[in-house]
Structures are given as structure tokens and as C-alpha cells.
Amino acid sequence: MMSLRPRLTPEQKRAKEEGEIERHNLEKRAESAESIRKSRRRFATFTGRIHYLTEFFDIAQSCENLLDKARQSGDLLVLGFDLEWPFSYKTGPGRTATIQISPDDETCCIYHVSNIQRLPKGLSELLVRSNVRITGNCVKNDVRKLARDFPGWDVEKAIENCVDLSQMANRVLATSRRWSLEDLVDNLLDLNVDKSKKVRMSRWDKVPLTDEQKRYAATDSYVSLVLYDVLKSREMSIENRTETF
């Protein structure tokens, strides 16, 4: 026989409604406090050296230098990686305009490829080299876009070299969330990251970039490398503790 749920008295209904209102107010106050906390923090900003290159020959030479660094490395060479491209609400995403690579936390190479028809051989060889890892948030999507815009190289091998920060964070932190770059910087570095629409949606295809665009672009690949280092350090610490028991 089906049991019927007893109806609430007017007093119980009022208490329930008041409880829901109070819970909602607490949640709003917590959100407000978190917003204030974030607004008072420093922004993650790349302050190292930016190599901004626009000509094919110069980009090719820079890529050869990075490739030589990978050849001479006895260990993995981890590269912070990011792309920028123009976006239109009418036509959607445009062709890849800039490629940012951070081989260390003091250097960022910004390759402005808007007027280039093919990738330098040194770059495609770098991205598929066995001792190179390409790291960034949703970095596989960036690599696939780069291959669509500049076909003719082994994109699947490059995908194998990708280390997605969101997936790495879930593995190391034992979570299962969809991380944005801002979330990762917030949680792991206790910093803000500038994602203002003014710069993010600007004309990335226009040569030359403004200083503001250069800083924005360099910061994304820089923090990608820093986040990788932080997560890798935590992962190694967890492994060491596990081996101790």
C-alpha cells in the first residue's frame, strides 16, 4: 500500500522557506567574499624576455635553436604552448595568428604566422620529437587547430607529446572537473590571470602586435609551463610518499 507523505503545517512550510532563503543568502555572501579575495590578488604576468618574430626566416631560425636545445637535452624538454587567433561572431574563429612557446620561465617565443603559408620544418620537427612535451590547457585542441591551418606534418605524433593540464590536474589532485586556465592559476598559484575581452578578442592577425597583446600571449604559455612544474612536483611528492609505505 502506498504511503502518503504528510503535508507540512503552515509553520513547517514557513520554516522551510526561511531555511532556503538563508541558505541562498549564505551562498551569495560566500560568492561575494570569494570575488573580493580574487580581486585583491596579483595577476600572473610574464616579465621575462619575449622573442617576437614575424618573418619566416627568423621564425625558422628560432625553431632550429629550440630543436638544438631538445637534441642536446638529456631529459624531457617541456614547452609551455598556446595559440591566438582572431574571432568574429559572423565567421567564427580565424586562422592561427600567433604561436607562443615557453621553453623556460624566463623566455617566450611569439611567432606571428598570419602572413606565413607553411610552418618551418624546425617547428614541426620540434613538436613531434620524442623527448619534447607540449603542455597547456586543452593543448590537444590547439595542436589540432594548428594542423588544420598549417597541414602537412605529423599531427598525431604531436598529439602524443601533449600534456593537457586539466587532465593532469585531475590525476594529481584526484578530482574530476573541467578546469579552465583561470581555475588552475587560481587554485595552484593563488593568482589571477587576465582574460579581458578587450585583448582576448582583439585583432591577433594584425602585424605587429601591441605590447599589451604580447604580454597577454606570453603569459598564457608561461603559466602553462609553471602549472606543469607545480603539478609535476606534487605528483612526484605523492609517488615518494607512496613508496615509503
Image: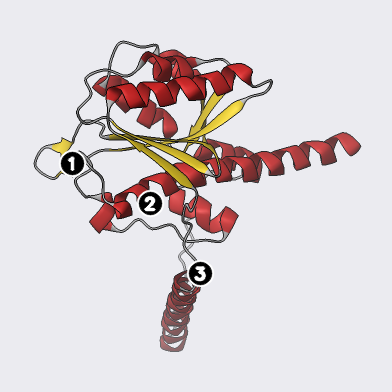
First of labels 3, 2 by sequence position? 3
Q: Report which quarter residue 226 is drawn in.
A: top right
Tell us which disc is closer to us: 3 or 1: 1
Camera-side residue of 65 and 10: 65
- Mark 3 to mark 2 CA distance (whole Å): 18 Å
- In the rendered view, tell whether residue 134 sits above or below residue 31: above
Q: Which residue is mark 1?
A: 206
Point out residue 3 in the picture as x, y percentages from the top left corner. Answer: 49, 61
Q: Is residue 155 visible?
A: yes
The local secondary structure at tag 1 comes to loop
- Mark 3 to mark 1 CA distance (whole Å): 32 Å
- Mark 1 to mark 2 CA distance (whole Å): 16 Å
The local secondary structure at tag 2 comes to helix
Q: Residue at x 25, y 38 (%)?
A: 85
- Amino acid marked by disc 2: Arg
Point out residue 243 in the picture as x, y percentages from the top left corner. Answer: 86, 34
User: Where residue 41 is drawn, which disc sits there?
Assistant: 3
Q: Which residue is mark 2?
A: 215
The local secondary structure at tag 3 comes to loop
User: Which residue reaches farthest right?
Assistant: 245
- In the rendered view, tell whether residue 26 sits above or below residue 92: below
Point out residue 70 in the picture as x, y percentages from the top left corner. Answer: 57, 21
**Colour treatment of the image:** secondary structure
First of labels 3, 1 by sequence position? 3
Point out residue 116 in the picture as x, y percentages from the top left corner. Answer: 23, 24
Q: Residues within 10 Å of mark 2 (few under 14, many from 20)?
A: some
User: Where residue 89 is drawn, which disc sits there?
Assistant: none
